[in-house]
Image (cartoon, grey):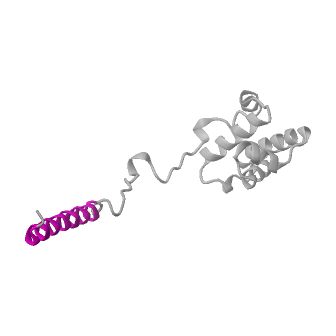
């Protein structure tokens, strides 16, 4: 598989150089980090977390350069066969944990304290006014 990545990377690099674009310009236009662009062009597939990222970046990069993905898949048919692609996700959708707010259970406490203090001040003021006979 690295041989296919290397050949496609060379093709993308040649196209980029023909267009006179630097890898920094590609990064700014596609939001693909320059280190990943270099890894694609050099055929280093180990740089990516999974092959899915590599394929996605290659697709976006090829589209930016104006290369058709169908043409690339015809030139490199063994590389684009999905049976050879290993999708090794470490975290599936079912394993994601819900992240709650750590103070979610205690959020009502400050409000209750403020409300209680307000009621207490009103009651003290009411009884003081009544005691002094101002009412």
Q: Nearer the viewer, residue 27 or 1?
A: 27
Q: Residue at x 81, y 50 (%)?
A: 24
Residue 99 location (% of width, % of height):
39, 56
Is residue 78 covered in magenta?
no
Relative height, residue 19 to residue 44 (above, below)? above
Residue furthest out toward the front: 134
Q: Residue at x 37, y 53 (%)?
A: 98
Relative height, residue 46 to residue 65 (above, below)? below
Residue 106 location (% of width, % of height):
28, 63
How many marks can you see? 0
Residue 8 location (% of width, % of height):
77, 41
Where residue 69 sits, quadrant-wise, is top right
The span picked out in magenta is: 108-133
Residue 71 location (% of width, % of height):
76, 28
Q: Is residue 64 left or right of residue 108?
A: right
Relative height, residue 47 to residue 73 (above, below)? below
Q: Residue at x 26, y 64 (%)?
A: 114
Q: Is residue 119 left or right of residue 59?
A: left
Where residue 16 sits, quadrant-wise, is top right
In the picture, the quarter occupied by the C terminus is bottom left
Q: Is residue 98 left or right of residue 21?
A: left
Relative height, residue 64 to residue 91 (above, below)? above
Q: Nearer the viewer, residue 71 or 59?
A: 59
Q: Nearer the viewer, residue 59 or 103?
A: 103
Q: Main secondary structure of the magenta part?
A: helix
């Amino acid at each position: 598989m690295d041989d296919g990545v290397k050949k496609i990377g060379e093709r993308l690099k040649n196209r980029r150089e023909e267009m006179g674009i630097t890898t920094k310009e590609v990064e700014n236009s596609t939001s693909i980090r320059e280190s990943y662009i270099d890894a694609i062009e050099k055929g280093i597939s180990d740089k990516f977390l999974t092959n899915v990222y590599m394929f996605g970046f290659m697709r976006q990069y090829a589209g930016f350069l104006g290369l058709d993905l169908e043409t690339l898949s015809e030139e490199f048919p063994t590389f684009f066969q999905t049976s050879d692609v290993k999708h090794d996700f470490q975290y599936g959708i079912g394993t994601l944990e819900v992240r709650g707010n750590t103070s979610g259970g205690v959020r009502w406490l400050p409000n209750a304290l403020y409300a209680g203090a307000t009621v207490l001040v009103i009651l003290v003021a009411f009884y003081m006014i009544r005691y002094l006979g101002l009412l």
